[in-house]
Amino acid sequence: MKLEQILFTQGFGTRRVCAGLVDCGAVRVGGQVVDDPSADFDTAGLVFEVDGREWPFRQPALVMLHKPAGYECSQKPRHHPSVMSLLPPPLRTRGVQPVGRLDEDTTGLLLFTDDGKLIHRLTSPKHHVPKVYEATTRHPVEEAVVQRLLAGVVLDDDPEPVRALQAECTGPNALRLVLAEGKYHQVKRMVAAAGNRVEALHRSAFGALTLPADLAPGRWCWVEPEAIFAGA
């Protein structure tokens, strides 16, 4: 693929802008400046630099963000900054979207991709992709609450009981839930229906992915799509 096209597909601007980046010597491949926009490169495993920043060729893009509190999962946020502002411009330009949503006060693992089929596969309830949530509760977690969550609770917008795939007490006021659905405020509403209240919420895993301990809030990293379904 021509270098100008490579930059374009990776979100570095219009074709004219990408050609200009190459012309002015802002692009390196293999540590060497490439000033010919028409230079051809094999995209398999390709890593290039733009203005000194290393960038791997990814098609499609899939990244994981450690979402901090105080950010909305929306392109047009109302009360807080958008999570999109935490991603670099090339990812925003190429149109990555959050895979599902986390409430503005919920922290943890949030995926972004520009692959519409992958978004559907990860968010559709029929595919049963598990998500792990760590909840801090207002009241001590009683065994009866855990059992209600496992047996199923009824939410006000659905007559069918909603069940946790797994539920366990992880501390005096701490609860771990594994869910396959992604209903609006689901964890908070389920815990409330079971007789307690969520004070803080964190998503620690999505599919086979676990939020790395060294990924600080507000930081992101690349993810291989197959890693989400590893062992499935």
Image (cartoon, rainbow, N blue to C red):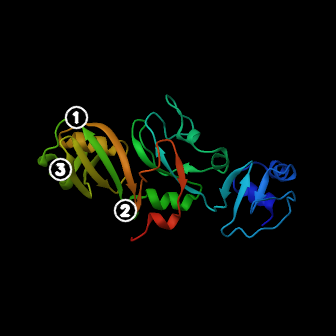
In terms of image quadrants, where is residue 222? bottom right
As rendered, which of 213 and 70 lies closer to the eye?
213
Q: Are marks 1 and 2 in contact (CB under 8 Å)?
A: no
Give the position of the C terminus as an image quadrant.
Answer: bottom left
Q: Is residue 121 above or below residue 110?
A: below
Residue at 56% x, 49% y: name it: 97
Residue at 15% x, 52% y: name it: 147
Query: Along the horizontal axis of the image, is 229 left or right of 49?
Result: left
Q: Which residue is mark 3?
A: 146
In terms of image quadrants, where is residue 104? top left
Q: Residue furthest top?
A: 79
Residue 31: horizontal and vertical position, in percent? 75, 60
Residue 13: horizontal and vertical position, in percent? 75, 48
Q: Is residue 99 above or below residue 118?
A: above
Residue 165: horizontal and vertical position, in percent? 27, 58
**Does the image show residue 203?**
yes
Q: Is residue 118 above or below residue 65?
A: below
Q: Which residue is mark 2?
A: 128
Real-space Cα separation, disc 2 to disc 3, in angstroms: 21 Å
Q: Residue furthest front?
A: 31
Query: Along the horizontal axis of the image, is 38 left or right of 125?
Result: right
Query: Along the horizontal axis of the image, is 20 left or right of 187?
Result: right
